[in-house]
Image: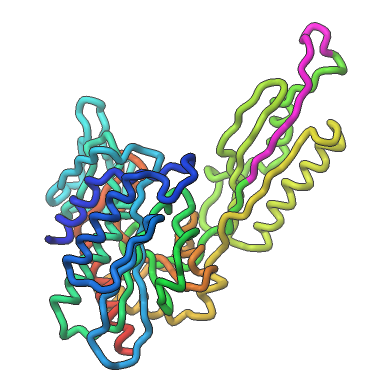
Amino acid sequence: MTLVERFLKYVSFDTQSDEKTGVTPSTPGQMVFARYLKEELESLGLEDVTLDENGYLFATLPANTDKPLPTIGFIAHMDTSPDMSGKEVSPRIVPQYDGKDIVLCAEENVILSPDRFPELLNHVGEDLIVTNGKTLLGADDKAGIAEIVSAVVYLQEHPGIKHGKIRLGFNPDEEIGLGAHKFDVEKFGCDWAYTMDGGEVGELEFENFNAASAKLTFKGRNVHPGYAKNKMVNSMLVANRFMSQLPDNETPEHTEGYEGFYHLTAIHGDVEQTTMGYIIRDHDRTRFEQRKQTLRQLVTQFNLVYGEGTVTLELHDQYYNMREKIEPVMHVIDIAFQAMKDAGVEPHVKAIRGGTDGAQLSFKGLPCPNIFAGGLNFHGRYEFVPIPSMEKAMNVVVKIAERVALR
């Protein structure tokens, strides 16, 4: 089975995760896919192939040298985003892309256009895998899984490439922020690992946001509007005044690079009660803590004005910037950087404006930077992946294994 055939098979599985179910994996389709992968890895002759009740699949490619070497891992997630249907994915290959519009679905006028997605023009002349305009593709992160498995097959077929023990880890529920929660780092048994979960060719990431979630509840007092003077407290208006106290230019649509933000994700309310959901993001830990403190101070101020208990805040940290865990072991970045060069890829070290399983795993004791998998426009019908990008990612995995053996 080729890399492309493997990828096309993987995306046929419906593995959307769902944050509302409260179980792991959060959807049964992920376990169906995990069982298929387990059978495939066993058929390839890998060792220590295990699948636990939570959908975490591990396997080992044994070392082919007696030289004592570190054990490294490659990790990718099996779930796809809840943002768009992943059921009955029907991909197609656009051969030698000509730089023009790609009609994904004529009947619904869904068009993948370089006018809206200029990154397409970086892949003129390449074969692209696209959607039918009705679902996401699933390159996030089934491209990563296909690349890792294909790289292992390549290493098996080329025993002249010496390598140490390599562990594979495929997990559920990354898209709902739970991919690393039940990941058994001790059982995985690696000195360090890489998630194959980035986008464009060359991406190498070891910085990500510090992240927290906030739920604000505003209590109001409802009376007849005709007789409401000095009596009514409209919780929606209080919530609106609270929002207005946060910086207008510190939202996702106004920030880039290392700039953090407050992001209003949901608001529901009536006169009696309004709830607002926020996520807080910042690469800098000090500024991250200051953002959380700003919310706490506003809650205190509003309760002084409107009465104690009018506003309550539930604040939860989600993950932290992995940089502080990677910097002491920068050789893991140096190896990946040189491996990309070996594979003919120009490395592009950048900070993630988001998070990965690797961030949480790094804080669980497994240094785990992130490498490109090649897909673009994740989580929607405009998702696509250039086949040469997947091939380069696969080659980077091979070159990392080779580089570690040269240390």
> Residue 299 occupies which quadrant of the picture?
top right
Q: Is residue 99 magenta?
A: no
Q: Residue at x 22, y 45 (%)?
A: 12
Q: Is residue 393 above or below residue 11?
A: below
Residue 333 appears in the picture as rendered: no
Q: Is residue 83 left or right of residue 270?
A: left
Residue 58 appears in the picture as rendered: yes
**Viewer-proximal residue among 380 and 149:** 149
**Viewer-proximal residue among 103 and 130:** 130
Q: Residue at x 87, y 18 (%)?
A: 230
State which quarter of the image contains the N terminus.
Answer: bottom left
Q: Is residue 106 above or below residue 295?
A: above
Q: Is residue 356 left or right of residue 135?
A: right
Q: Is residue 270 left or right of residue 66?
A: right
In percent of width and height, residue 218 lies at: 72, 32
Q: Is residue 63 left or right of residue 6?
A: right
State which quarter of the image contains the C terminus.
Answer: bottom left
Q: Is residue 54 above or below residue 346?
A: above
In percent of width and height, residue 259 lies at: 58, 55
Question: Which region shows up in magenta?
Answer: 214-228
> Residue 404 occupies which quadrant of the picture?
bottom left
Q: Residue at x 85, y 14 (%)?
A: 229
In percent of width and height, residue 197 lies at: 36, 59
In percent of width and height, residue 62 lies at: 26, 80
Q: Residue at x 40, y 41 (%)?
A: 82
Residue furthest out toward the front: 53
